[in-house]
Image (spheres, rainbow, N blue to C red):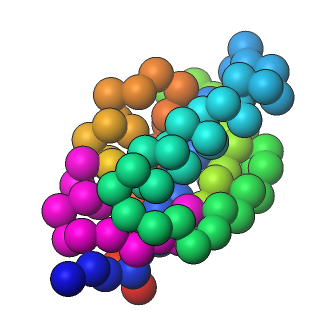
């Protein structure tokens, strides 16, 4: 049984060039593909944060729409939280 999910990841832009951010986006896309089916990746780009996160005022937003087993979103959030350069992650079931 699989469910549809949407995950929003905010990546740090501090001291990172566009290639490093693109690599982070691809890393999480590959992780999702290994455990489910990616329906789309919507990159919002660099946006101003509503409040400071780790003393940063801007972040790079990427929204992943995917289908996977119910156990995978918890693993995705665990990996995101221990990955350097990820400011925030939130996954919701559609």
Question: Looking at the picture, does residue 8 appear above or below residue 55?
Answer: below
Question: Is residue 77 shown left or right of residue 46?
Answer: left
Judge by depth and name the residue closer to the eye, 77 or 30. 30
Residue 72 in the magenta stretch? The answer is yes
At x 57% / y 73%, what residue is drawn?
39
Judge by depth and name the residue closer to the eye, 72 or 57. 72
Residue at far top of view? 15
Q: How many marks?
A: 0
Judge by depth and name the residue closer to the eye, 12 or 36. 36
- Residue 7 in view of the camera: yes
Judge by depth and name the residue closer to the eye, 8 or 41. 41
Give the x, y percent position of residue 37: 46, 67
Give the x, y percent position of residue 27: 54, 37
Give the x, y percent position of residue 67: 40, 74
Give the x, y percent position of residue 4: 39, 80
* Quadrant of the rendering where the C terminus is positioned: bottom left
* Quadrant of the rendering where the N terminus is positioned: bottom left
Residue 55 in the magenta stretch? The answer is no
At x 66% / y 30%, what residue is drawn?
23
At x 60% / y 33%, what residue is drawn?
24
- Residue 57 in view of the camera: no
Question: Looking at the picture, does residue 56 appear above or below residue 8?
Answer: above
Q: Which residues are magenta?
A: 64-75
Q: Quadrant of residue 71?
A: bottom left
């Amino acid at each position: 049984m699989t469910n549809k999910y949407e995950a929003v990841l905010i990546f740090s832009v501090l001291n990172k060039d566009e290639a490093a951010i693109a690599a982070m986006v691809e890393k999480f896309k590959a992780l999702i593909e290994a455990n489910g089916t990616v329906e789309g990746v919507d990159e919002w780009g660099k946006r101003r944060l509503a409040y400071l996160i780790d003393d940063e005022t801007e972040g790079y937003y990427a929204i992943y729409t995917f289908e996977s087993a119910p156990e995978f979103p918890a693993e995705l959030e665990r990996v995101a939280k221990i990955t350097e350069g990820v400011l925030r992650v939130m996954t919701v079931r559609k």
